[in-house]
């Protein structure tokens, strides 16, 4: 397992940690200011959300690389299934944005259960069909697609993949190396079969997302914990992810409307670095 105590080059900031991706949240820093603050603190990468990028993808990507960091990824595609599914054009647009930014990975939150259906079977079938339609475009753009399974409480309107096993099964159905998964502590920490599921991932882990699960979670979307403040076994999860061959960025993604988003961004970033070195 990698030793992060003296080396933060694998540390990436997901800008959600500063509340940047939601209207009315966060300190309103520009991407440029954020890039400078991350560089100063030794971050190795940044993951942006589409709404921050607008039409400036190439410019922002260049700025990140000029600062000596990488754009580690882009969040995220429109939903592919469910009531709020986006169009094929929107999906292609998100792939193109990732490519222009120089982001090697585009995260997918699948969307929920398809209208007019119940359960998950039909939704997963349609998800596989829709994904397959975009694989060639993604390959040509040099962007890998990472399915992120979400905690089952997000079933219904946000996801039809609940576990690493679900995501790998979907990868198997599509059967293309352009498609893999992202493992997020918040969504997988409870899964006792995580180790055995990850053992069959074999090179298909495209992202690892860090946060913590608070003992008393007050809001299921916006009350994530900072690493070390909760009950997730961060060491064991990273050990399993790395045993499965993952050696990429560890992306800190702390949605925290009532706590971390209320603090000065400098304090949040300093805390992220300190926790990364000591508890992740
Ligand atoms: Zn995530």
Image (tube, rainbow, N blue to C red):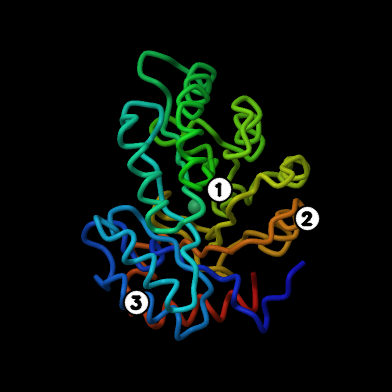
Q: Distance between the residues labelled 3 and 1?
A: 24 Å
Residue 33 image-quadrant placement: bottom left
Q: Are marks 2 and 1 in contact (CB under 8 Å)?
A: no
Is residue 75 left or right of 178 when viewed as pictured? left
Residue 31 image-quadrant placement: bottom left
> Secondary structure under badge 2?
helix
Labelled disc at residue 243: 2
> Secondary structure under badge 1?
helix
In front of the other: 27 or 250: 250
Residue at 54%, 34% in the rendered image: 161
In front of the other: 277 or 69: 69
Tag in front: 2 or 1: 2
> Secondary structure under badge 3?
loop
Sequence-first disc among 2 and 1: 1
Residue where numbered disc 3 is placed = 263
In front of the other: 128 or 167: 128
Name the residue furthest front: 140
**Image height check: is 203 above or below 25?**
above
Q: Distance between the residues labelled 2 and 1?
A: 19 Å
In front of the other: 183 or 36: 36
Labelled disc at residue 187: 1
Q: Would the CB of label 1 be found within 8 Å of ligand 1?
A: yes
Query: Alpha-carbon neighbours of circle 2 within 10 Å: few (<14), some, or many (≥20)?
Result: some
Give how far across and how far down residue 206 sits, in percent.
60, 50
Query: Alpha-carbon neighbours of circle 1 within 10 Å: few (<14), some, or many (≥20)?
Result: many
Is residue 165 left or right of 275 when viewed as pictured? right
């Amino acid at each position: 397992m990698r030793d992060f105590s003296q080396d933060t080059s694998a540390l990436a900031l997901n800008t959600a940690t500063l509340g940047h991706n939601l209207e009315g949240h966060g300190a309103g820093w520009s991407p440029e200011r954020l890039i400078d603050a991350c560089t100063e603190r030794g971050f190795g990468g940044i993951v942006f959300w589409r709404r921050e990028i607008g039409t400036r993808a190439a410019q922002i990507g260049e700025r990140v690389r000029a600062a000596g960091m990488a754009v580690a990824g882009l969040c995220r595609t429109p939903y592919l299934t469910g009531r709020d599914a986006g169009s094929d054009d929107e999906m292609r647009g998100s792939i193109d944005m990732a490519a222009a930014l120089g982001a090697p990975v585009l995260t997918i939150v699948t969307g929920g259960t398809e209208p007019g259906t119940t359960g998950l079977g039909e939704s997963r079938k349609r998800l596989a069909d829709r994904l397959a339609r975009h694989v060639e475009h993604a390959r040509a753009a040099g962007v890998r697609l990472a399915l992120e399974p979400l905690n089952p409480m997000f079933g219904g309107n946000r996801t039809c993949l609940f576990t690493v096993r679900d995501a790998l099964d979907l990868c198997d159905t599509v059967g293309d190396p352009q498609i893999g998964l992202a493992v997020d502590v918040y969504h997988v920490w409870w899964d006792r079969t995580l180790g055995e599921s990850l053992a069959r991932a074999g090179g298909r882990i495209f992202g690892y997302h860090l946060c913590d699960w608070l003992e008393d979670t007050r809001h299921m979307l916006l009350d994530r914990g900072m690493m070390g403040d909760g009950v997730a076994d961060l060491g064991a999860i990273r050990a399993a992810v790395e045993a499965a061959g993952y050696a990429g960025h560890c992306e800190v993604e702390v949605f925290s409307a009532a706590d971390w988003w209320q603090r000065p961004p400098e304090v949040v970033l300093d805390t992220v670095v300190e926790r990364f070195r000591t508890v992740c």
